[in-house]
Amino acid sequence: MNIRFTEPYLPTQASALVDACLRSGQLSGDGPYCAEAEQRIKNLVGADHVLLTTSCTHALELSCAMIDHVDGGEVIVPSFTFTSSATAILQAGLVPVFVDVDPSTMNIDPTDVIKAITSRTRAIMVVHYAGIACDMAALRSICAEHGLLLIEDAAHAIGGHWNDRALGTLGDMAAYSFHATKNIMCGEGGAFLTTHASIAERAEIFREKGTNRKQFFRGQVDKYRWVSKGSSYVLAEPLAALLSGGLAEFDTVQQIRRALVERYRQRLSEPSIETQVTLPSIPSYARPAWHLQHVLLRSEGHRDDLIRFLREHGVGTAFHYVPLHSSPMGLECGAPRRPLPATDDAAPRLLRLPLHTNLTVANVDVICDLITQWVNAQ
Ligand SMILES: Cc1ncc(COP(=O)(O)O)c(C=O)c1O
């Protein structure tokens, strides 16, 4: 048996789409395929301003580059996240301030956010872990009260909702990932979203090497020039063609993933298993994006033992994230040292189970049978 941890979703017409793009002659970005993919994202999540980027990391860098600040400006971010959330903050010359998570979801803990706010805080970056919404009522009201920008690292979260609103449209700016491991993918890719026309205008320029090239192509200026700081974050057309094909099949992808997650949740909530394996909770305000299926074990040792057991039976699993606050760069980057007991306790106990569109409900049953066998041997 060989059940892979992850496999990329290839749209049904993937080769034909990329081939048509290659033959069209336009391979650099912001051509018809980028426009089509951006429109599909807008329609899907109800966003006004969407810019495709080369990765979610770059969309986060673009978000942080939009934050006005003086030296020492701070951005609050969970320690339990991918490095990109923090590197984007540092790239913009801001200081990450790491906060704790609620272990029932592994999402940012609003009570710790309040404790971390100082006169230097400029923004809060939240991560909808596994595609399950953070407590946005609390986080939005903290931002409103303290005049802070709200950035959603929605790498896992396209298609997920907080109440009836799409994740990625709830703050000032957001970033999606279309990396090969994500629900919809183009190998490497991302999207930047903002709810503000003024930020969209600045971000469009920053993303195009600091030039007003897009304004030139729209006929708004007579030549394009260097007008601001910038970088190069435009997605190439062949990747946008692949992405657009995936987005067109979004509902099918989500139905498959949802059925798999529901089966995992049904099987792993059996009383005999619950003593050893804890499922994440799904708050009543959250409609998940079905991106990851993670569980918490009783200890790091139990987690590592279950990884080994499943590997011996041909099932691939993974764990992450090594908390950022205690990582070598986290200790050196100027972040204030704060106790993060929930992160320290939960992160080493977390295990991610296979979840991809080539997995079947029968595969999930096999995995859950193996977990049951392991639990019974404890
Ligand atoms: C929370 C989070 N943010 C950002 C990223 C970076 O995404 P990308 O690989 O598209 O740059 C990841 C990657 O998985 C992630 O998990």
Image (cartoon, rainbow, N blue to C red):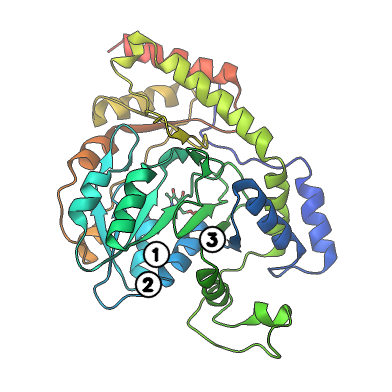
* Amino acid type at image mark 1: Ala
At a point 64% along the width and 35% down the height, the residue shown is: 253
Residue, disc 2: 92
Residue, disc 3: 192
At a point 54% along the width and 59% down the height, the residue shown is: 193
Dot 1 crowding, Cα within 10 Å, few <14, some 14–19, many 20+: many
Helix, strand or loop at mark 3 = strand
Up the image or down, 319 lies above or below 261; here it is: below
* Amino acid type at image mark 2: Ala
The N terminus appears in which quarter of the rendering? top right
The answer to which of marks 1 and 3 sits earlier in the sequence is: 1
> Taking the image as drawn, is residue 358 in sight?
no
* Amino acid type at image mark 3: Phe
The answer to which of marks 2 and 3 sits earlier in the sequence is: 2
Distance Cα–Cα, label 2 vs label 3: 16 Å
Tag shown at residue 268: none
Q: Is residue 199 left or right of residue 253?
A: left
Helix, strand or loop at mark 2 = loop
Image spot of residue 166 (x, y percent): 53, 45
